[in-house]
Amino acid sequence: MNVFFLALAMAMPSVETKSVESGGFTWEYVFAKPAGQPKGLILAMHGAGGSGPQFAESAQWPQKATAAGFAVICPSGLPSRPNAEPSFATNPRVWNSGQLNPRSQRVKVDDLAALDNMIQAATKEIGKAPLFVTGHSNGAGMTFRVAYEWAGRVQAVGMMSGIRLFPLTKKPLHPIPTLWIVGEKDPLSPFEGGTTKMPLWGTEKDNPPVVESAEDWAAWMDGKGSLASKAESGGVVRMQFGKSVHVWECLGHGHGWTGGKKGELPDSIIGPEVAKIDATEELIRFFTAHLN
């Protein structure tokens, strides 16, 4: 083999579709790892109606994570009716983040156990590595939940266009560095809060204001939740709450994953997509800065 192509092949990341069994269900996920030893493992969760392969492709997690030296898991959540075939319009894949109807079948499924099985499988393959968690929309809400439940395991978290929808009752073992990217014009998770209704599924959600939620998250971690700094540049207002929580408000932007492949939902549902930053790249930089 030509030396150039041999070197190229050795540098190519490994991308596979895998599955684990948990709670009587089969959970599929995309797993990618760099050619060398990963410096960390990223768990990246899609929004409601999405899937692991969809989020991997639209946000370019396999390419960008492995290029930075990380392994990445992009899991597929189970649908709202977990025993039926998933359908974006009638039976979307979701995460048990705290926003599901408490009387639904789906809320009884233990998502954390399934995610843990995926992480354990990855650890057997790549060895122990720092764990970072991220997600979009409903996956962002699940990121908050994973950070809360696994506060002693998670190195740092990042999320976009989602909200925490559960109470904070137990204290973490240590602060969790957090980068929360939001859109100023997000109609589904409004910056100022309020009740929203998803037109496709008719589901309602009560959203607390982002600033209030960030203050609570920061106070939960290190006892200081007040705004520490605020500055705007390049269409992004960067705020810090306490010592560990960073909120980036993308001016004029809606609900979509910034820098990613535009989805099929129209702006009338998810709002405009105007932000100049690439959320995937920014989160990878944030995770890299918190490896130690």
Image (tube, rainbow, N blue to C red):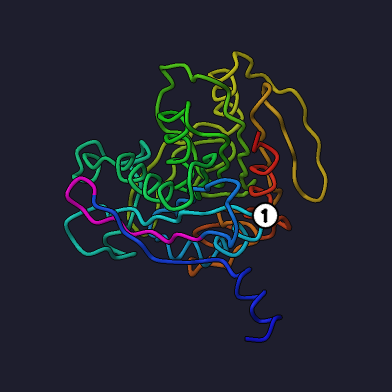
- What residue is shown at x 37% (from left), y 50% (from top)? 121
Q: Residue furthest bottom?
A: 1
What residue do we see at 56% from left, 57% from top? 256
Query: In what quadrant of the picture does the C terminus appear?
Result: top right
Please say if 120 is above or below 156. below
Q: Main secondary structure of the magenta part?
A: strand
Helix, strand or loop under label 1:
helix
Name the residue type under label 1: Glu
- Where is 176 relative to 43, above or below? above
Number of numbered discs overlaid on the protein picture: 1
Spot occupied by residue 90 in the image (x, y as percentages of width and height): 27, 62
Which residue corresponds to the image point at 38% horizontal and 59% vertical from the top-left? 29
Mark 1 crowdedness (10 Å alpha carbons): few <14, some 14-19, many ≥20 = some
Q: Quadrant of residue 102?
A: top left
41 displayed left or right of 101? right
Give, as a single range, the part of the protein colored magenta. 22-32
Residue 16 percent coordinates (x, y): 43, 66
Q: Which residue is mark 1?
A: 281
When the figure is inspected, residue 245 is found, relative to residue 260, above or below; the finding is above
Residue 268 vs 23, above or below: the answer is: below
Residue 181 lies, in percent from the top left, at 62, 44
Residue 191 image point, x, y percent? 59, 39
On the image, which quarter does residue 1 sit in?
Answer: bottom right
Q: Quadrant of residue 226?
A: top right
The answer to whether 222 appears left or right of 148 in the picture is right
Question: Which residue reaches farthest top?
Answer: 223
Q: Residue at x 58, y 36 (%)?
A: 156
Most foreground residue, 30 or 231? 30
Is residue 155 on the magenta stretch?
A: no
